[in-house]
Amino acid sequence: MINTIGFTERLQKVITFYEETASSFAEKIGVQRSSISHILSGRNKPSLDFVMKVLHSYPEVDLYWLMNGKGKFPKADEIKKDNTQPQLKFSESNPEPLTQIPNSKNSLDLTEIDKIIIFYKDGSFKSYQN
């Protein structure tokens, strides 16, 4: 059973954190403004669809935190950078990424990018080939 009062307080915290109005928040997650108003006033309980739209639009919101207050918000604080992966470097004078792999044994070797694939959380992807 969801604690509606706790949920509305956490939802209000999300709206405030992103400096949104109830109207702009509703537009961003794709629901009617009245839905936000009714949930914040305690008139209606959030549907699963509503919760999933919040999580999809704001990935820093943790499901367990939103539903029952357990966990952290924003959850991005918990993510630690993994410095083992090569990062593309950009220069202010040249917006194109350098194709040099940082920390390689021979920093003068340039590696050409053949293909880039971007994977999305919904399972779809886009492929770009040189």
Image (cartoon, rainbow, N blue to C red):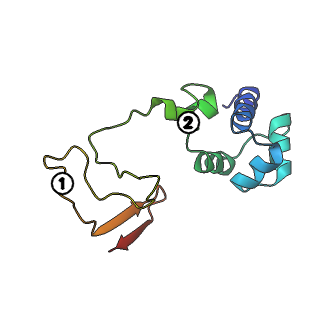
Give left or right: position of 26 versus 124. Answer: right
Q: Residue at x 51, y 35 (%)?
A: 76
User: In which image quadrant can residue 99 be found?
Assistant: bottom left
Q: Amino acid at mark 1?
A: Leu
Q: Which mark is residue 62?
A: 2
Q: Is residue 118 above or below residue 101?
A: below
Q: Nearer the viewer, residue 119 or 1?
A: 119
Q: Amino acid at mark 2?
A: Asp
Q: Which mark is residue 14?
A: none
Q: Nearer the viewer, residue 87 or 12?
A: 87
Q: Nearer the viewer, mark 1 or mark 2?
A: 1
Q: Position of residue 101 (x, y in %)?
A: 25, 52
Q: Is residue 68 above or below residue 30?
A: above
Pick the quarter of the image with the N terminus: top right
**What residue did someone put label 1 on?**
108
Q: Nearer the viewer, residue 33 or 16?
A: 16
Q: Position of residue 52 (x, y in %)?
A: 61, 48
Q: Residue at x 72, y 57 (%)?
A: 30
Give left or right: position of 63 versus 93. Answer: right
Q: Residue furthest front?
A: 93
Judged from the image, the secondary structure of the residue bearing numbered disc 2 is loop
Q: Position of residue 27 (x, y in %)?
A: 76, 54
Judged from the image, the secondary structure of the residue bearing numbered disc 1 is loop
